[in-house]
Image (cartoon, grey):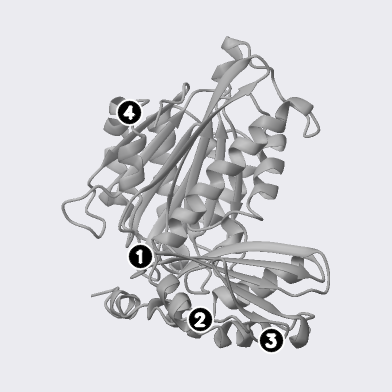
Amino acid sequence: MPAIEGLRIATAQAGIKYKGRTDLMLMLFDPGTSSAGVFTRSKCPSAAVDFCRKNLSGGAARALVVNSGNANAFTGKRGSEAAAMTAKAASEAANCAAGEVFLASTGVIGEPLEASRFTHLLGSLAGEAKPDGWLDAGKAIMTTDTFPKYATATVKLGDAEVTINGIAKGAGMIAPDMATMLSFVATDAPIAAPVLQALLSKGVGKTFNAITVDGDTSTSDTLMLFATGAAAKRGAPAIVETGDVRLAGFKRALNRVLKSLAIQIARDGEGARKLIEISVEGAKSSRSAKRIAMSIANSPLVKTAVAGEDANWGRVVMAVGKAGEPADRDLLTIRFGDLRVAHHGERDTGYSEEAASAYMRGDHIRIGVELGIGRGKATVWTCDLTKEYVAINGDYRS
């Protein structure tokens, strides 16, 4: 992960829940950094989400504080006080206004967050922060993740090269309805906050909003994008309009970063052993295609069949039929990988149980559905559902 000019990172072990590992991350931005964000649409958002939404209208960022182990959600007045206390300490450490601070918390819901356990660390972290701290940052924000998630891209903006870096965390309670879980992306491109917001709001549709692990939307889902503008010194043009044609390459690179992070989250679903990619074509509309794809992706029966390496395409038929979207049984075609297993309302005449079962033993399963009634299409990603998922979540607060 290359450094992003105008940005520094530090992490620490605060002992919020986990022992012997980092659980606190501070990201500092130079003056002039613009910000954008998308957050959970849950009606029970965390205190950190409320705080970020309030500050986002300012469009400026100087500090980001993330803690893992405690979501600071459903914690009432105490939760708001903990967020305010954290922001005050961060603003003092960064020498900025509290309105330029952003927060994110992830972990157990309903447990009061004792901010005093880590706010005293922020001053020293600010002094230790370094531009090359991305790898440590990815580890510090994890909860039940089995690996940290990173993505990076380099692209031309005008005649100058700019960099986009991103980290993410998430493995369970994954069914985003905005962005997803926690993810933080930064660039040195000089892009105004309204333009950043437009790019991010659109970019989540086919990336973070196209994954699911268990169908549950978190109270804390936060995706933020920061632009330090440091590349302007190297000749990168300032982008202040969403229709600027010079944005095309940057937009594609940003979407690649978002897609990579989103798929990493789906692959790391709690207890998961297989990544499942579901593509629906020939639907009445793209929206309809996505709803059908999500119906398949969120089906416990489909996910357990994949876990058991059972080529049970009948469960895919079931998930298509229950989606509540236009479909014609007698036009439906289903593929597992390149194998056509069902065609026009019945089992394919060339179906081979041996070949289908062999395909299901892979760790990346592609399910293709063709509805034959329109031009709508969509792709989503999920994972299999294993006994380990039940074990992890049955013991989550132990």
Q: Is residue 87 above or below residue 295?
A: above
Foreground label between 2 and 3 = 2
**Residue that badge 1 annotates:** 112
Q: Depth check: give the residue in front, 99 or 293.
A: 293
Which x, y percent locates residue 71? 40, 61
Q: Is residue 69 above or below residue 122?
A: below
The answer to which of marks 3 and 4 sits earlier in the sequence is: 4
Which x, y percent locates residue 308? 37, 81
The answer to which of marks 1 and 3 sits earlier in the sequence is: 1
**Residue that badge 2 annotates:** 352
Dot 1 falls on a residue whose secondary structure is loop
The answer to which of marks 2 and 4 sits earlier in the sequence is: 4
Mark 2 surroundings: few (<14), some (14-19) or many (≥20) residues within 10 A: few
Marks 2/4: CA–CA distance: 58 Å
The answer to which of marks 2 and 3 sits earlier in the sequence is: 3
| Label disc, if present, on residue 321 of the rendered structure | 3
Marks 1/3: CA–CA distance: 43 Å
Foreground label between 2 and 4 = 2
Foreground label between 3 and 4 = 3
Three-letter amino acid code at the position of disc 4: Ala
Which x, y percent locates residue 344? 73, 83
Q: Depth check: give the residue in front, 117 or 60.
A: 60
The answer to which of marks 2 and 1 sits earlier in the sequence is: 1
Three-letter amino acid code at the position of disc 3: Gly
Mark 3 surroundings: few (<14), some (14-19) or many (≥20) residues within 10 A: some
Three-letter amino acid code at the position of disc 2: Ser
Location of the C terminus by quadrant is: bottom left
- x 49%, y 60%: residue: 220
Marks 4/1: CA–CA distance: 28 Å
**Residue that badge 4 annotates:** 129
Marks 2/1: CA–CA distance: 55 Å
